């Protein structure tokens, strides 16, 4: 176990020194495995893991769902989502902030990436929020928080990664994210409403719309709703596998691109490049995680960790809350996907060994990853939004994100205490 802990220290040192996480895990995993089995077996293990991961059928879900979101963005349907949400919610206190959150949830349903969701909706919603007098830092905080909905409402890249690492049904994970995603959106809207009551200057003026304008705006979002219903309806009832639904979704996004007159070569090329770039970033990390996990297993860390937790005689909920606290602390300094790759191989055997549902734990992990995306100093969503709002500092956005962090913690507590929030929909799947 001591060698495993030393391996973690070396991994952290290499990562903070600037070596990409995937290559850091490969290096430490190979050297650590070689200590126990020799260099030749370690290299053979690493090469086999690279082949197995690269040939993984489940991993093909990621580029296809990302491609679907990219096509939807290039077709300018994200603008239609925000316009419809603005027409229906703009007249409320903090109406444009509510609309931004609703549009983020809608775009998250066809995207799968939190960073892409935050960046897209910032480009769409931030100018309108400024026009109505919203505080730029609060607008940025709202959009950074709204972007986190992109990985809880399916499709979700972190859910796919979790499913691959733990061999959990990805379709059930997607179904389990729907109700918690809606719950989190409503809690975020409650945070906006509280801000509108206590600091009305931050939420500017209201944007009224007639009933005719509201119903007319619905037409613009029907394509997105239809695509989501078809892709995930087929997945939910068992007609499609996750990979098949991702392929159909990508094709649907491409069809909308042409139907809306945006099917230019530049748009298609950019969408393909974005999808390929994300996959290229994830592949070495996924391979590295598999190699590093083999080292941790042979070093005895997973077994020792499980024995240590059992020796504490904590109730299952106590263990879960302790794990959540660890995740929240790690989220302050680590990227969300890095946390999943580093911790799930350790925590998953502990949780399942206590008889807890792996699908439910996957949703818990995604929620705490979401919190890490908006907490300082390495809140990636905040940094992405700040890059698109050059006159606002990242710390100004962080100072306005507190209400959303509280909402996220409340969602986490509710899902932990009431697992059926996540498990109700998957319970109807075969």
Image (cartoon, rainbow, N blue to C red):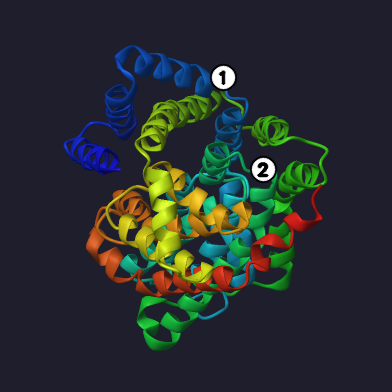
Q: Residue furthest bottom?
A: 198
Measured from the top left, where is residue 338 in percent x and y?
37, 43
Measured from the top left, where is residue 149 in percent x and y?
53, 57
Query: Secondary structure under badge 1?
Result: loop
- Residue ID at (61%, 31%): 58
CA separation, marks 1 and 2?
18 Å
Q: Residues within 10 Å of mark 1 (few under 14, many from 20)?
A: few
Taking the image as shown, residue 409 lies to the left or right of residue 140, namely right
Residue highlighted by disc 2:
169
Residue highlighted by disc 1:
55
Question: How many numbered marks have been drawn onto this rendered protein structure?
Answer: 2
Can residue 130 be seen here? The reply is no
Query: Secondary structure under badge 2?
Result: loop
Measured from the top left, where is residue 371 in percent x and y?
41, 61
Which callout, 1 or 2, points at the residue further toward the start of the chain? 1
- Residue ID at (65%, 49%): 174
Q: Does 299 sit above or below residue 264?
A: below
Can residue 320 be seen here? The reply is yes
Measured from the top left, where is residue 240 in percent x and y?
78, 36
- Residue ID at (49%, 80%): 193
- Between 115 and 213, which is closer to the camera in this rendering? 115
Taking the image as shown, residue 88 lies to the left or right of residue 295, namely right
Q: Does 127 sit above or below residue 292?
A: below
Classify the position of the N terminus by image quarter: top left
């Amino acid at each position: 176990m001591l060698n495993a802990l030393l391996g973690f220290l070396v991994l952290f040192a290499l990562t903070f020194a600037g070596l990409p996480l995937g290559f850091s895990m490969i290096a430490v995993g190979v050297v650590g495995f070689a200590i126990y089995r020799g260099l030749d077996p370690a290299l053979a293990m690493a090469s086999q893991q690279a082949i197995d991961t690269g040939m993984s059928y489940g991993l093909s879900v990621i580029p296809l769902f990302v491609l679907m979101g990219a096509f939807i963005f290039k077709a300018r349907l994200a603008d239609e989502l925000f316009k419809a949400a603005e027409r229906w919610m703009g007249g409320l206190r903090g109406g444009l902030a509510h609309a931004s959150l609703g549009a983020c949830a809608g775009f998250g349903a066809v995207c799968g990436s939190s960073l892409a969701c935050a960046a897209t909706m910032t480009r769409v919603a931030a100018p309108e929020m400024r026009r109505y007098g919203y505080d730029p830092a609060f607008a940025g905080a709202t959009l950074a928080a709204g972007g986190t909905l992109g990985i809880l409402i399916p499709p979700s890249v972190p859910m796919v990664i979790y499913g691959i690492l733990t061999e959990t049904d990805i379709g059930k994970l997607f179904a389990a994210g729907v109700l918690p995603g809606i719950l989190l959106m409503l809690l975020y809207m409650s945070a906006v409403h509280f801000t509108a009551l206590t600091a009305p200057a931050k939420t500017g003026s209201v944007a009224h719309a007639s009933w005719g304008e509201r119903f007319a705006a619905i037409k613009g979002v029907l394509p997105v709703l239809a695509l989501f219903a078809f892709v995930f309806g087929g997945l939910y009832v068992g007609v499609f596998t996750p990979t098949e639904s991702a392929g159909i979704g990508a094709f649907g996004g491409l069809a909308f691109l042409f139907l809306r007159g945006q099917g230019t070569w530049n748009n298609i090329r950019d969408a393909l490049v974005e999808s390929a770039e994300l996959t290229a970033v994830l592949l070495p990390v996924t391979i590295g995680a598999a190699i590093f996990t083999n080292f941790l297993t042979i070093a005895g860390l997973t077994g020792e960790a499980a024995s240590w937790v059992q020796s504490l005689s904590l109730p299952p909920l106590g263990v879960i809350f302790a794990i959540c606290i660890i995740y929240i602390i790690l989220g302050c300094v680590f990227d969300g996907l890095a946390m999943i790759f580093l911790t799930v191989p350790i925590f998953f055997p502990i949780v399942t060994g206590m008889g807890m549902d792996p699908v439910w734990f996957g949703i818990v992990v995604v929620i705490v990853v979401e919190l890490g995306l908006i907490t300082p100093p390495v809140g990636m969503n905040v940094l992405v939004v700040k890059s698109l709002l050059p006159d606002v500092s990242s710390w100004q956005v962080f100072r306005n994100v507190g209400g959303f962090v509280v909402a996220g913690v409340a969602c986490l507590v509710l899902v932990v205490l009431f697992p059926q929030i996540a498990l109700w929909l998957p319970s109807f799947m075969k």
